[in-house]
Structures are given as structure tokens and as C-alpha cells.
Amino acid sequence: MKTILRALALTAALLAAPALTPAAHAAGEAKHPEKQAWSFQGPFGQYDQAAVRRGFVVYKQICSSCHGLKMLSYRNLGEAGGPFQAVAPKNWQLRGEEPVLGAPGHGKELVNAIDNPWVKAIAANYEVTEVDPNTGEDVTRPARPSDKFIYPYPNEGIGRAANGGAYPPDLSVIVKARHGGADYVYAFLTGFKDEPPKGVEVVEGKNYNPYFRGGWVAMANQLGIAEEAGVITYEDGTQATKQQMAKDVVTFLQWAADPKMAQRKSLGMQVMIYLLVLTALLYAAYKQVWRGQKH
């Protein structure tokens, strides 16, 4: 009886406890992100390729000046399931036909990422510095689809110097690396406040975001600034609001962290169907072998 009473008292105390205050956020706690609806959620979820492409635009024009994607190569953009996968008829180059964005089917096959014109154009916007084997001197050349995404800083020291001592994290697997995943990254990108709540001490040179542990972060409200300045214009006509840009870039970063998700889910469903059929066959065989037997 005493144990039950203690449990009831503890439950009442927890229910009566005050909600997390801004001062608590400033002390180190972070606000829990709200749940969002994502196309890639669930066992049947798939990437919205239009959103992934829009998200790449946001990353390229806003995020890439500070954050890298060191685990991705440009060719990954044009591989199966990538935002710029293209299809064309067999021997399309010899026939003088142009590839189109889309999935294989109806007589069209996936274009090799190395030959993908969208991927080649994206890579060509960047320069790679390498050592000339003949002279031993550094030379620059346009990036190729096979190259890794060019990192914004040559080393961490320069990166910190450019950002007031804070080193921008790599975004290759940021969605998987953060508790809350896509919901957290979206909440962080849209959660900046012009001023902190009352009782929270201002930190010079930092910006307040209740979703960030400690509340103060070196990063500015980049998407808010981009929305006001009209930096992003989507080719498909989608309005580039802060929330829309956050949704799109998070979808792109989810793809970057798990580019083979669609293939994995497809294989998983095939395995499940196979196991169900096998189970049915085994049960039928069991009933046939032991028919008429008591056991």
C-alpha cells in the first residue's frame, strides 16, 4: 500500500511540475521539436524528388558557403534514386537524343551518372585543386561528377576564423546524427527568434534559437534572411517561403544521409512478400503431411 501511495505522489508531483522555462533552455535544455509530415516516413514512404531538387537549390545557394557534404560525390545526384537521375533510350548519345529527368521505364534506361548532363553542369560550377604529376605544382580544373562535393573551407582553422570561432558542421548525415532527425533540423531552421525571452541573458555575437542546446548559436537566421531578400527562386514556381525552403532542404539532407532508402524499402517489401508466401507453403505442406494425424 505504501508503495502505491508513493507512486501516486510521484505522479502527482510530475504532473504539477512547471513547464520548461526559457531560463532552463538557456541553462542547457532545448525545446522539443514538433512532429512534421514527411513524404519519406513509414515503410512505404518515398522521397519527393521535386522537393529534393528544390532542397539542393537551397543548399547550394545558402548552406554550401559554410557547410559541406564531404560524404557525397556529385555523381550521387544522378544515381538511381538521386534528385537528378535521368533516363534516355538505349544508345541515346549515338542517336542524338537528349535525356530527361525521371525513372527508368517505357523503353528508357537510367543514364550513367558520369554522362548525366545535369550532374556534369553542377560539378563544373566548382574547381578542384590538385598537384600536376609532371610539374609538381598546384593546378585547378573544373570538378567532375566523380569528385567529392567541394568543402567550403580548406581546414578547420580557417572555418573557425570565418565564423567567430564556431566550426560549421558537415551536413552529410546531420539528419541522422541529431536526436529528432528531420523534425529537429526543420525546427532549428525555422525556430530563430529576434530576441530571447525575458530572463535570458543576451550573448553578444550569437543568435537565439530555443531548439538549440543552450539557446545561443553562431549561425544566423539564414532562411529568414533569404526569404526577405528573395534569394531563392524555384523553377517549378513554388513560393520560396522560409518554411518551404526549410522543408525542401531537410528533404534533401534526408536523401543525402540515406540515398538508397527507396531501394532498401523496395527490397524489404520483396523479402516480406517472399516470407509470407513461404510461410503459406510451409503451412500447406504441414497440413498435407500430418493430415489425419492426432498430435
Image (spheres, rainbow, N blue to C red):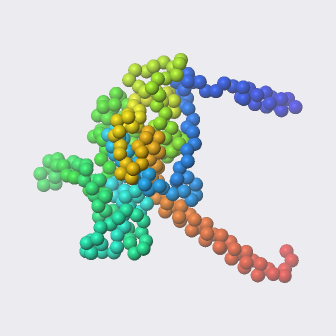
18, above or below 283, in the image: above
Q: Which residue is drawn at 37% across and 48% down?
A: 234
Give the tally of numbered discs: 0
**Which quadrant would the N terminus be assigned to in this image?**
top right
134, above or below 11, in the image: below
The answer to which of 6 and 221 lies nearer the viewer is 221
Q: Residue at x 57, y 59 (%)?
A: 44
Image location of residue 38, percent across then percent down: 53, 50
Q: Is residue 8 left or right of residue 250?
A: right
Q: Quadrant of residue 18?
A: top right
Q: Does any portion of residue 29 appear in the rendered image?
A: yes
Image location of residue 127, percent across then percent down: 23, 49
Image location of residue 137, percent across then percent down: 14, 48
Q: Quadrant of residue 280?
A: bottom right
**Which quadrant would the C terminus be assigned to in this image?**
bottom right
Q: Is residue 215 left or right of residue 98?
A: right
Q: Residue at x 49, y 27 (%)?
A: 215
